[in-house]
Image (cartoon, rainbow, N blue to C red):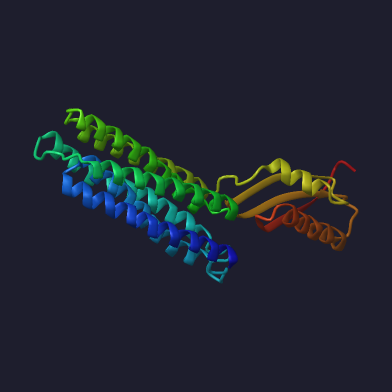
Amino acid sequence: MHRTADIRKVLVLTLALNVLVAAAKIVYGHMTHSVAIFSDGFHSLFDGVSNVVGLVGIYLAAHPPDEKHPYGHRKYETVFTIFIGVLMFATCIEIFRKVINSFAGRHETLVTTESFVIMIVTVAVNIFVTTYEKRMGTKLNSEFLIADSRHTRSDIMVTLGVIVSLVFLKLGFPQADPVAGLLVAIFVATEGVRIIHDATESLVDRQQTDATLIKEIVCRVDGVIECHEIRTRGTKSHIFVDVHVLVDPAMTVDEAHKIADRVEEDLKRGMPEVVDVVIHIEPSTMV
């Protein structure tokens, strides 16, 4: 529960900051007819939306295992991580619409001193958010926070690009605005693909940790002759382990069971992210 509460605090703080940043960009971008600033504002807005999605996902993931969900609800966090990627694709639709209108010359972009001030301030806020969120995501083993920090990091790069486009607009290159908006859309789509790919790997039970470390821990247990067929699944912070352990065939069932208990205890002690271990005891032919 401490982990869930800590993740929730991070999301609430970053939500407030992301909403302020997005509002500043969208309102000012609309007022000045800047496709680049307006598009960047939507990019930031989905940082905030992803925080809301994260709060819901973390709440569901924190529920304990039950009869219908014996492995718990932790993968809800992964499902909602994928939703972030989907939202980023939705953002691209609005951005492309603005880009097309701008290339068609349906409005003239205004560039003022306030344009630069707003963009520079929002970059500073985003640098704080992405650094803080990534640090806490690593500390709390939250793939959602890490994915969300990457989303915000992309916002920094996009905003820097928008600032450059404002410079070119000021120098008399009107096409710099829609070009910057187009680059924003491409950047958003690329990051969305990356986030969906990483989250999907977790859902399809990709190996979640180094099998070598598991083998080292298991083989140090007295009575274990060898182990093989090591499999892991789950998420980085919530790992399920399957392992086949070879023991002396002359052992009694009770003796083998005690070895299995020690293997489970040592794995959970040596790897705190391991929450469940299934051990298959086999007679060794090496004795």
Q: Which of the pair 141/198 is nearer the observer?
A: 141
Picture coordinates of residue 250, whole percent (x, y): 91, 53
Residue 155 in which image quadrant: top left
Left or right of 199 on screen, residue 105? left
Left or right of 180 on screen, residue 47? right
Residue projecting furthest to the bottom: 67
- Determine the residue positioned at 54% across, 62% down: 6
Q: Quadrant of the N terminus?
A: bottom right
> Total marks drawn?
0
Q: Is residue 276 visible?
A: yes
- Determine the residue positioned at 63% across, 49% down: 232
- Determine the residue positioned at 30% across, 32% down: 164
- Determine the residue positioned at 55% across, 49% down: 135
Residue 186 in which image quadrant: top left
- Is residue 268 depicted above or below 214 in this figure? below
Picture coordinates of residue 207, whole percent (x, y): 60, 45
Picture coordinates of residue 99, whole percent (x, y): 19, 38
- Is residue 176 depicted above or below 24 in this figure? above
Q: Which of the pair 268/180 is nearer the observer?
A: 180
Q: Quadrant of the C terminus?
A: top right
Picture coordinates of residue 247, whole percent (x, y): 84, 50
Q: Is residue 96 visible?
A: no
Left or right of 144 on screen, residue 276? right
